[in-house]
Image (tube, rainbow, N blue to C red):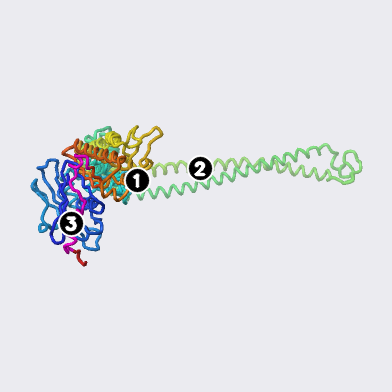
Amino acid sequence: MQLLALALYARDGRRRDVRFQPGQLNIVTGESKTGKSALLTITEFCLGRDAYLIPAGPIADHVAWYASLWQLTDNPDGPRAFVARPAPPKGRASTQRAMLEFGGAAMDLLGHQELAENADSDSVRRQLGRRIGIAENVIEPRGPGVGQVPFEAHLGHATWLCLQDQDEIASRHLLFHRQGENQIFQHLKDTIPYFLGAVPADAAAKKAALRDANRAQRRAQAALAAAEQEAAIAEANLRGLLAEAHAAGLTDEHDLTERAQIVTALRAAVRDLQNNDGESRASLGDRAEESAIKHQDRRRALIRRRAELRNQLWHVMDDRALLLDRAESERDFVGAVELHTGRLTSLELLPAASDVLTASASSCPVCGSQIEEPDPTATALAERLQSLRSELTSLEAAPESRREVLIVLEAEADRLRQELAAVETAVVGLEAGDQAIRVAQDAAASRNYTRGRIEALLGVMTAGTGDSLERLRRNLDTANARVTQLLAGLDPDVDREQLLSRLNIVGRTMTDLAQRIGLEHVEDGVRLDLANLTVVTDTSDGPLPLQRIGSAANWIGYHLATHLALHKFFVENDRPVPRFLMIDQPTQAFYPSDVAKNAGAINDTDREAVLAMFLVMRDVVDELAPRMQIIVSDHANLVDEKWFQRAVRHHWRGGIRLVPTDWITAGNEPPGA
């Protein structure tokens, strides 16, 4: 895409054409304030910029429409595009209105009467961008902390790489067009890799597809895990039901492991139970009805008799315990009496009772000595001894009668125990009969319960569970393959290497061009620092950014070397960037005064530097011809260089300017003037 012409339309319909040659170096030389710098602003406006930055003065006052004619391919016989933009209403600083027409090689600038709005700035950028190869794309902002949303690289982003106004070409801080504006710095960083070809147009789309594929993979994994868990639970339930059915007597199978075999056995068990269930339940019901009353009466009578026998046995055993307690007490008493009697037996050694009675109560009965505190008399002790012996005699006679009573009580207890055992046996027998009926009833109920569980589980189980699991596994395999495929195409290391490789190529070209221009600090190489959007020269003391390189001549030279190197790469690799570079005032650092600017005269010292810059531009265009166009607006006019004069397309001196003088003097005043 190269610029063939710009056109200004006066309000009265007159047209001012500024034509250029594709595939060549085009120079517009002239005095100050002739409109040279406005060419870049008009070109950007025609390429879809909304802001209306035409400088105030004759241009803004007398121009109603701005137009451009473009050759869309390198072939001069290829298609063309005509883009026109109306000036916004007075007081407005922007507009989106536009006109866009496509045609063949014969298409030229349209007349004023043919101008009509049929598009907007967005459609101009989109349609022109598609024609030069900017495919649909999505750019994801790079770098930590970037808060921008993904966007599409379009013709406007590519245009930033094709323009250098006079404030930018001589800046040591700004390398690209509009780099200092809000968000454009980040957009440049994000889109340059795309325009270099380091990032495929569909990279962001593939990342979005990868996110979708990851989500699909997670869903497939979750679905398969849930299905496998459900299948495992179903397997466990089937095995459990088979064991339960076997315990309930519904089936003889109990050691099956295959799912299909278990299901078949359970279905057969349910079917057999349904056939026999009616008869079994009727038989159990009749038996229970016949024996219920009889068993209940007999059981109640036996239980009452058992209670009576237990009560009688308790009383007999209580009486026996009383006798045994009394015998124990008597044995203790006999022991005490016998001990006391033994102590008193020594009284038989005393004199006869008559003698004892004559003795004084205060003298000892043995030796006759006087006693201060008299003891009981021997007569009293003898009487006590006779009394104790009488009690012992009566106690020895009692055990015989007590043993007889104990024998009677024990015999009664044995009888009661035997009768109680018989009653207990009868009760147990009756309860065993009742239990047998209950067991039969419970077994039937258990079988019915088991059958219900089997029928419920078999009812909710699908015959295609295995097929469903296999389908889910295939879905997961497909999702895994899709993720693997997308990851292979989105390797960040590969993208980084691709970008580094292209920047190295551009850097080598920058170094070569910088040496030909005669710039400083170029000995060890020059490169583009994409992270900071600046030029860096490598020195023995470390990297030296453009901000630290002195003189405007160096700043301009490095700008020129960078943009020529980038466009050389774009052209040689057929990248979707317009094939033109428009530069405003690249020699401004070499003019000591406005007089020198207007004359285009440069002293001999600076002339070599200016000549070197234009020679480099000429050589790059010739090398890439006819695929590259350079348009330079400048004061310089190297009259002694024939090739330079051949490149001059417009010479705006001696009253010639962008807006013709007669537009202003012929009464074509702006509205409201």
Image position, residue 39 (x, y; %): 22, 51
Q: What amino acid type is highlighted by mark number 2? A: Ala
- In what quadrant of the picture does the N terminus appear? top left
Q: What amino acid type is highlighted by mark number 3? A: Pro
Query: Could you say whether the residue bearing mark 2 is in a helix, strand or loop?
Result: helix
Residue 257 can be seen, yes or no: yes
Does 30 appear above or below 225? Answer: below
Based on the picture, tell me whether residue 661 belongs to the magenta stretch.
yes
Query: Could you say whether the residue bearing mark 3 is in a helix, strand or loop?
Result: loop
Residue under the image location 74 percent in, 43 percent down: 388
Measure the alpha-carbon separation of dots 2 and 3: 149 Å
Residue under the image location 49 percent in, 47 percent down: 312
Camera-side mark, 1 or 2: 1
Measure the alpha-carbon separation of dots 1 and 2: 124 Å
Camera-side mark, 2 or 3: 3
- The residue at which mark 1 appears reads as 173
Q: Which residues are magenta?
A: 639-668
Image position, residue 354 (x, y; %): 86, 43
Query: How dense is the environment of label 2, judged by Cα within 10 Å: few (below 14), some, or many (20 and up)?
Result: many
Which label's residue is closer to the chain start, 3 or 1? 1
Residue 497 can be seen, yes or no: no
Measure the alpha-carbon separation of dots 3 and 1: 36 Å
- The residue at which mark 2 appears reads as 413
Q: What amino acid type is highlighted by mark number 1? A: His
Residue 660 is marked as 3
Instruction: Please tell me how many numbered marks the rendered image carries.
Output: 3
